[in-house]
Amino acid sequence: MTGPLHGTPALGDEFVKGLWRDNPVFVQVLGMCPALAVSNTARNALAMGLATSFVLILSNAVISSLRHVIPKQVRIATYILVIATFVTVVDYAIQAVSLDLHKALGAFISLIVVNCLILGRAEAFASKHGIGRSLLDGLGMGAGFTVALFSLGAVREILGSGTLFGIQVFHADFQPWIVMILPSGGFFTLAAWLLVFNAVTARRARAAEPLEAPR
Amino acid sequence: MTAPARTLEIRTSPHMVSGYSVDTIMFNVVVALLPVTAFAVYAFGLAALLVLSTATVTCLLTERVACRLSGRASSLGDWSVAITGLLYGLTLPPGLPLWMVVVGGVVAVALGKALFGGLGCNPFNPALVGRAFLQAAFPVAMTTWSPAFTSDRFTALGSSTLTLPFTRPLYDAVTSATPLALWKFERQASEVGELALGFIGGSTGETSALLILVGGAYLVARNMMSWQIPVAIFAAVAAFSGALHGLDPETYASPTFMLFSGGLMLGAVFMATDMVGSPMTSGACLLYGAGIGMLVVVIRVWGGMPEGVMYAILLANACTIHLDRWIRPRVYGATAQEAPR
């Protein structure tokens, strides 16, 4: 909550809002393409989440520091330029760290550039607030995105191959649910998590409602 | 003494009362399915009985739980879930492990029906949603067919039926291929008489075409099923596959083979005519049926799988809302130019 009526929010709130209240995947429903495409194993999901967070945090910081310098008419193009720089850095970094992780993530690393989450936070937040707040916002959103992706990836990998991070979780005779590794499984898992998320949010909202006075 | 006040209900014409409610119609569909079910148990024995009863009970329980969780009154009394369970069970291979039947049943009712809002709100046929999920999740188990009319079918269960939950099933040495798979992968034709009467392998309910047609005829006679849909499906399948067969008899199967093999009969008569998933007007029903027929032949001939009825019906269900918007029922008293008076 910002604005003259509520005052500027606390610094901690900028970080925490990305985890639950404004979670990028479950509330804002942004960045669905990497969320569904590379979450077939927990390792890929975690890697994609961390890569996106890295780009988000640094691009937020840079754009926030340049916010008074960038002209309004070319701001989107400039933001994309900044974001693309960091995506290139991440791309080479992943290649250096693990070549088969790079192959597994494939084209989706480059697609981080067009992830609506990063451009959205740049436009909606980093261009209007100071560097400190933008950094916290990036950290919170990145953390929320990574947690969401990891939850998708973990469920899909456990049910779809019986492993977690490559370690066999079930006994050897486990019948894997092939559908979970397929794209349709991604949609089913996302829907299931959204159901859980919304049920919890609705229950909290009901509990927090003040009781109506009888007329 | 004054007479008690009465409410006078005024409704405009036309007045038509058919006397049929949802549960009457659904009950009659169950009755129409009984010959098919009986034949399924007769052909595949104890395993089929277990699969069918597990499927039905799972669907009933899931519906009960879903109604309770969503705060709706229990809708078990309208028999629609019984049909879903029975139809879902009839599309499964008879030797399928029971834990997979349970998983599919839960998905069918929870995902295919309850999440969308219950009876009348689901865009897709719930039984087919369950089967499609199982097909994607356990492709090997869903395409392993047991032979029909084995001598020990009433006394012994196959080794796969009672596998522990979440465990890979082990199959007996004897498994048979369906006529469709035989044609697609080995170009081996089957006798039409055998196909129609049901002395072949396949999923639990699809084998006896004759009994399915008898059940369908009963429903049409009682005016509880729109005959346009199965007729359109059969006509489209016959026409399209006939044209292909005429062009190249060696590569393309004959129309009678296409009509009587696989799940086409069961799908056309009982699944495609599901009142929620099919269009409202007869013109739209004809188009819907024709679309399903074309898709079935396309998938069977050029698709990767030997059987395409399930996906054809699901795809056509997705088009139903557009068909209903395009072909609207005629409003009584309205002509094409004037608005209704």
Image: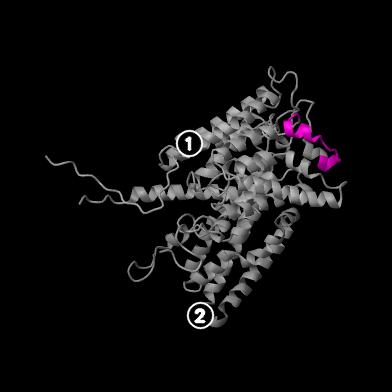
Name the residue at 52% across, 67% down: A121
Which of the 4 quarters of the picture holds residue A13?
Answer: bottom left
Dot 1 corresponds to which residue? B24
Name the residue at 56% across, 64% down: A117
Residue B75 in percent (x, y) is at: 45, 38
Q: Quick check: is B189 in the magenta stretch?
A: yes
- Tag 2: residue type? His
Which portion, as a residue range, is magenta?
B183-199
Residue A188 in percent (x, y) is at: 59, 48
Q: Quick check: is B300 in the magenta stretch?
A: no
The vertical placement of A55 against B58, above or below, is below
Q: Quadrant of the N terminus of chain B?
A: top left
- Tag 1: residue type? Thr
- In the image, taking residue A124 as reference, residue B102 lies left or right, namely right
Q: Quadrant of the C terminus of chain B?
A: bottom left
- In the image, taking residue B66 as reference, residue B237 lies left or right, namely right
Dot 2 corresponds to which residue? A68
Name the residue at 52% across, 60% down: A141
- In the image, taking residue B64 as reference, residue B246 lies left or right, namely right
Dot 1: what SS? helix
